[in-house]
Every structure is written in structure tokens, then in C-alpha cells.
């Protein structure tokens, strides 16, 4: 499931896929945090792990979507509509 899908799509995904995404997201988040303090691409791993974890939980997905909308509005206010969509 991609990040932009609707929260109702979460329940349509089979249980094994939801468990797999939650597990993979959790592991990537933990590895990303460890790599922030050790050599490695910690931020990149976190940027992959967080959407995987969030897309399985409807409540977290709604919060992430609201945060992304607020950031998009701030970018549009600061740089104009054209630059915020890039």
C-alpha cells in the first residue's frame, strides 16, 4: 500500500501483509535509529521504515497525512504553489 492511499484500504489488505509491513517498518525504524549513532544511512533507512509502519495503522496514517498537508500548505505559503509540488 502506498502512503497516499485511503485509510479504509488498510482493512482490505490481507492480515499477513499487514503483519509483514508492520514488522519490516519496525525493523527499519530500529536500524535507522541505531545508524544515526553509528556509520550508516540512518536517515534514509528511517525515511523508508516510517511510511511502511504508518501505512498499516489507520490512525497513524491519518496523523501523517494531516502533517503532510500542513507542511505542503507551509511550503506553498512560503515558496508558492509551483515549488511546493516538486
Image (spheres, rainbow, N blue to C red):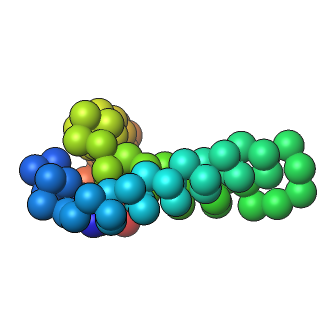
Position of 37 compared to 11: left or right? Answer: right
Q: Residue furthest right?
A: 39
Residue drawn at point x = 33 percent, y = 63 percent: 16
Residue drawn at point x = 16 percent, y = 48 percent: 7
Q: Which of the two residues, 55 or 76, is positioned nearer the viewer here?
A: 55
Quadrant of res 63: top left
List x then y, in percent, for residue 78.
37, 40
Q: Is residue 1 placed above or below 60 in the rendered structure?
A: below
Q: Is residue 82 placed above or below 31 in the rendered structure?
A: below
Q: Residue furthest front?
A: 16
List x then y, in percent, for residue 65.
26, 43
List x then y, in percent, for residue 42.
72, 54
The quadrant of the rendering that contains the N terminus is bottom left
Residue drawn at point x = 71 percent, y = 43 percent: 33
Q: Which of the two residues, 61 or 81, is positioned nearer the viewer here?
A: 61
Q: Is residue 66 visible?
A: no
The quadrant of the rendering that contains the C terminus is bottom left
Q: Is residue 69 placed above or below 46 in the rendered structure?
A: above
Q: Is residue 8 visible?
A: yes
Position of 26 compared to 42: left or right? Answer: left
Residue drawn at point x = 71 percent, y = 52 percent: 31
Q: Which of the two residues, 13 or 73, is positioned nearer the viewer here?
A: 13
What is the total number of numbered labels drawn onto the structure image? Answer: 0
Quadrant of res 82: bottom left
Amino acid at each position: 500500500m502506498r502512503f497516499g492511499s485511503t485509510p479504509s484500504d488498510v482493512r482490505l489488505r490481507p492480515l499477513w501483509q499487514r503483519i509483514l509491513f508492520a514488522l519490516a517498518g519496525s525493523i527499519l525504524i530500529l536500524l535507522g535509529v541505531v545508524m544515526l549513532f553509528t556509520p550508516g544511512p540512518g536517515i534514509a533507512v528511517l525515511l523508508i521504515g516510517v511510511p511502511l509502519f504508518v501505512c498499516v495503522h489507520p490512525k497513524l496514517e491519518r496523523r501523517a497525512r494531516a502533517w503532510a498537508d500542513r507542511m505542503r500548505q507551509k511550503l506553498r505559503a512560503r515558496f508558492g504553489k509551483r515549488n511546493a509540488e516538486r
